[in-house]
Image (spheres, helix red, strand yellow):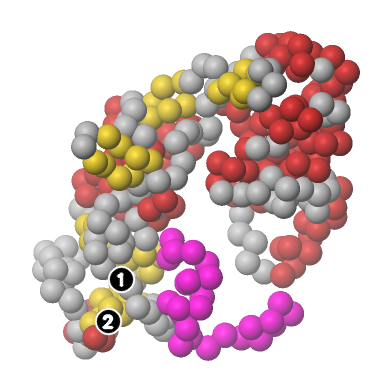
């Protein structure tokens, strides 16, 4: 391992502490996913370097600050706080000591031009009453929608969301379940099957907008968000999601890791044997035992891995 590093150019500021003999991991991208990877690698004993082209941690969860105001650039709420608490626990820390996360009640209120409104909250009876107030004939549809949402949560979030799907056979095995759950139907189309009232169709289908998705086009698997809200509530971190990102960055640093901002990775030339590496413009190279990319998948494969030979397979190159 040391021989590989001896023959590599290492950019100033990235050189390892001579007294730190831990294996080195590079994480490309300081978004929430990259920071979570860095925290887990740090907990496993790696010396982690997180690289990002921005000037702060958070990626799409970061914020702009001007004249005493904060402008969130992406997500604003948390619907699965247990995921963060589990992550912190892996690192031997208490999430609630580092982040002030507070439940939101009610979640939100939707208002329409005709003066009607819909108030969303965690209490199922209260939600049923709201549906009945707007459209009594849609109460049964609401009950079915809740069951639909829970089924997609267990399959899409707890099942598929927790295992690798990088092989073609992995996909083939789950296609029947996708078909049964009508994953080909959009979120709005599914809501339209359950609700007759146009307002309720909108109220129970807008959630993909949270992640920049179009309710008229994204798969109905995303109605699982309704179950997340009902089961775990909606929460807000004081300081925004950017505050969570800052807290994650502090954990990485407390583990002995480093965050390097204003750096752009040009390539990650994977080798047959470790260590791997990352190339900066002008052929500067930083070596690592593991490289994790939290960049968009398209950018990772088309740019960072552009010079790596790809094996042809059933799904193409």
| Residue 93 shown left or right of residue 174 in the figure | left
Q: Secondary structure at mark 1?
A: loop
Queried whether the magenta region covers residue 191, the answer comes back as no
Q: Which residues are magenta?
A: 293-317
User: Which of the two residues, 281 or 195, is positioned nearer the viewer here?
Assistant: 195
Question: From what the image shows, is residue 99 above or below residue 9?
Answer: above
User: Which of the two residues, 151 or 29, is positioned nearer the viewer here?
Assistant: 29
- Residue 45 in the image: x percent, y percent? 30, 55
Q: Quadrant of the N terminus?
A: bottom left
- Residue 141 in the image: x percent, y percent? 85, 25
Q: Contact (CB < 8 A) between labels 1 and 2?
A: yes
- What residue do we see at 18% from left, 76% from top? 11
- What residue do we see at 20% from left, 53% from top? 256
Which residue is most to the front? 114
- Dot 2: few (<14), some (14–19), or many (≥20) neighbours within 10 Å? few
Assign the magenta stretch its main secondary structure: loop
- What residue do we see at 40% from left, 46% from top? 73
Question: From what the image shows, is residue 140 above or below residue 167?
Answer: above
For label 2, the residue is 281
Answer yes or no: is residue 147 visible: no
Q: Secondary structure at mark 2?
A: helix
For label 1, the residue is 264
Image quadrant where residue 196 sits: top right
Question: From what the image shows, is residue 101 above or below residue 173?
Answer: above
């Amino acid at each position: 391992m040391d021989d590989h590093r001896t023959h590599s150019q290492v950019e100033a500021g990235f050189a390892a502490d001579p007294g730190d003999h831990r294996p080195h991991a590079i994480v490309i991208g300081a978004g929430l996913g990259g920071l979570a990877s860095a925290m887990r690698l740090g907990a496993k004993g790696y010396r982690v370097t997180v690289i990002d082209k921005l000037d702060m941690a958070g990626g799409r969860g970061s914020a702009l600050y001007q004249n005493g105001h904060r402008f969130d650039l992406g997500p604003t709420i948390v619907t699965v706080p247990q995921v963060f608490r589990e992550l912190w626990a892996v690192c031997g820390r208490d999430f609630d000591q580092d982040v002030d996360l507070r439940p939101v009640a009610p979640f939100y209120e939707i208002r329409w031009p005709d003066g009607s409104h819909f108030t969303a909250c965690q209490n199922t009876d209260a939600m049923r009453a709201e549906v009945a107030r707007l459209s009594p004939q849609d109460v049964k549809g609401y009950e079915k929608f809740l069951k639909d949402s829970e089924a997609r949560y267990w399959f899409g979030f707890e099942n598929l969301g927790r295992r690798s799907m990088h092989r073609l056979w992995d996909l083939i095995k789950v296609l029947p379940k996708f078909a049964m759950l009508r994953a080909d139907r959009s979120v709005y189309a599914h809501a339209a099957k359950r609700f007759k009232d146009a307002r309720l169709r909108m109220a129970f289908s807008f959630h993909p907008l949270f992640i920049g998705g179009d309710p008229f086009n994204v798969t109905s698997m995303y109605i699982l968000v309704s179950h997340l809200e009902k089961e775990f509530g909606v929460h807000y971190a004081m300081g925004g999601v950017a505050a969570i990102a800052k807290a994650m960055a502090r954990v990485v640093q407390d583990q002995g890791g480093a965050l390097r901002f204003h750096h752009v990775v040009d390539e990650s030339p994977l080798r047959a044997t470790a260590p791997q590496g990352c190339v900066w413009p002008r052929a500067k190279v930083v070596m690592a035992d593991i490289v994790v990319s939290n960049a968009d998948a398209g950018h990772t494969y088309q740019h960072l891995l552009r010079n790596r030979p790809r094996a042809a397979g059933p799904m193409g190159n």
